[in-house]
Image: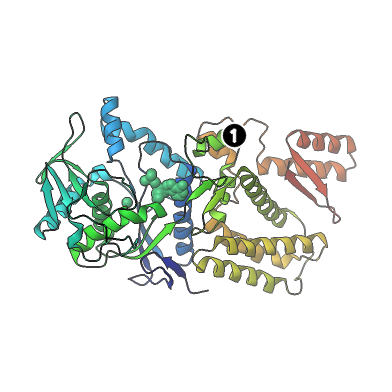
Amino acid sequence: MHEIRVHNTLSGKVEPFVPLKAGVVHMYTCGPTVYDFAHIGNFRTFVFQDILRRFLRLRGFKLTHVMNLTDVDDRIIANAAAAGVGIREYTAKYVEAFYADCRTLSVESPEHWIRATDNIDEMVALIQKLQKKTYTYDSEGSIYYRISKFKDYGKLSKVDLSGIQAGARVDNDRYEKESARDFALWKAPKPGEHFWETPIGAGRPGWHIECSAMAMKYLGETIDIHTGGIDLAFPHHENEIAQSEAATGKPFVRFWMHAEHLLVEGEKMSKSLGNFFTLRDLFGKGYKPSALRFALASVPYRRQLNFTFDGLQQASSSVERLRNFAARLKNEKFPAGRQAGMSERIAKAASDFDAGLSDDLNTAQALAAVFDFVREANIAMDKGEFRKDEVKPAQEFLATFDKVFAVLEDNDAEKLQALGYDTGSDQASDAEIEKLVAARQAARQRRDFAESDRVRKELAERGILLEDTKDGSVRWKRK
Ligand code: AMP
Ligand code: ZN
């Protein structure tokens, strides 16, 4: 196994990853703001953190991973007030959709799903701590963080503080990315909008204090890994550091990991450009969850991901190739014994796979290790050289791959049905196809060619192509 190295935004370097406590990783992920359906850009970042958590688990770490749902946010509060409903009621639909989307993309549940609305007391307590240490000032019923008092401000994002005007305040959760300004920890109530009555006054928390308070509540004052999309490094994560470290005097996060953005056909996703896609938009066009997961996972997280429909199609073929290979291992009859060099070849593939992921989660390199091996093993099978004793180690390697990538199981149709898509009764599962293929083989063996032709035709109608191989076995693939 290789040394795990990750890029730390804080140092700007790729560093060996060692958790604070041996064998245990405490990790926090900024979750979605639940005012709308998540888009495929959001899921680029959530699939990245899923690959990270799965890889750490594969490598034997025990994980405590927290993901929050940001359900207190300017847009949510304003939208809920406009709709005349409470925050919980307004966000329920998007929270459910987010959970369903995660299941559909095989994004594992973290150990804790948490919500801002359930942790207001901790946010208030953290603000009180900052008040005592004079990091705050009040203005018109709101409480602001005085960033000039925190000498390390800017250390994560390297934002230039030279232009900062003392006391320049911003009340919005999201503001322009260039200027560092004092930000609201607590916001005065606005007419008609939801607020909490608390010891620091009536109002609601700012976005940044939510994550600081929740991360420290669940994971302690110093946590191992904090993840998010690159747009969150400034100001959100910079502000989280300022709040947490001012309050505790300890380092808040040891490794900051940020995913670069997803672009669509080279452009930033936006509703006005018509290139804005939720998962459901793609499933509605007939694309499979496994293909989308593969497409999102296959580009290393620190590279921008240029999403294209061609790329999605290729991802679909790649998944198919792997599933076919797994089916060959399971179904074909191989001659007994070992093939010279093959067990070393499998061990090398496994080692290269681990090397790729250990190298700052280089998924492209890890996948190359898998596909190189699959190509060579397929050739060996076609030549009749692949032997029975190699089946189990090859299957074990595929299982290791799938613990991280999670695309081998043929469950796309079920997942889409669970989301309410009619995938059509002609969408056959692997098991059904294999049954038909076996029935055709049996018909051929008893020389009932009428029946074997009928089955081949039925399979063709369901989009399955058959290929008879030299050794008498049959391979199939979807058109
Ligand atoms: P939000 O719901 O806006 O708070 O975003 C949820 C997560 O998605 C955050 O980690 C963002 O940084 C990330 N994100 C937003 N847009 C993109 C994008 N186009 N590509 C990758 N990640 C993104
Ligand atoms: Zn956050």
* Quadrant location of the C terminus in the rendered image: top right
How far across and down, in percent of the image, does residue 430 sit? Answer: 67, 44
Count of marks placed on residues: 1
Residue at image position (89%, 38%) is 449
Query: Where is residue 247, by image quadrant?
Result: bottom left
Residue at image position (51%, 69%) is 359
Question: In terms of depth relative to the viewer, which is nearer, 381 or 89?
Answer: 89
How far across and down, in percent of the image, does residue 199 sit? Answer: 9, 45
Q: Is residue 88 above or below residue 22?
A: above
Left or right: residue 470 compared with residue 185:
right
Outermost residue toward the front in this view: 163
Left or right: residue 79 compared with residue 385:
left
Q: Is residue 388 above or below residue 128?
A: below
* Some atom of ligand 1 lies within 8 Å of the CB belonging to the residue at label 1: no
Q: Is residue 29 visible?
A: no
- The residue wearing badge 1 is 285
Query: Where is residue 80, by image quadrant?
Result: top left
Residue at image position (72%, 44%) is 434
Secondary structure under the numbered disc 1 in the rendered image:
loop
Residue at image position (66%, 64%) is 394
Left or right: residue 223 compared with residue 168:
right
Left or right: residue 185 compared with residue 281:
left
Type of amino acid under label 1: Lys
Q: Is residue 272 visible?
A: yes
Question: In terms of depth relative to the viewer, which is nearer, 476 or 96?
Answer: 96
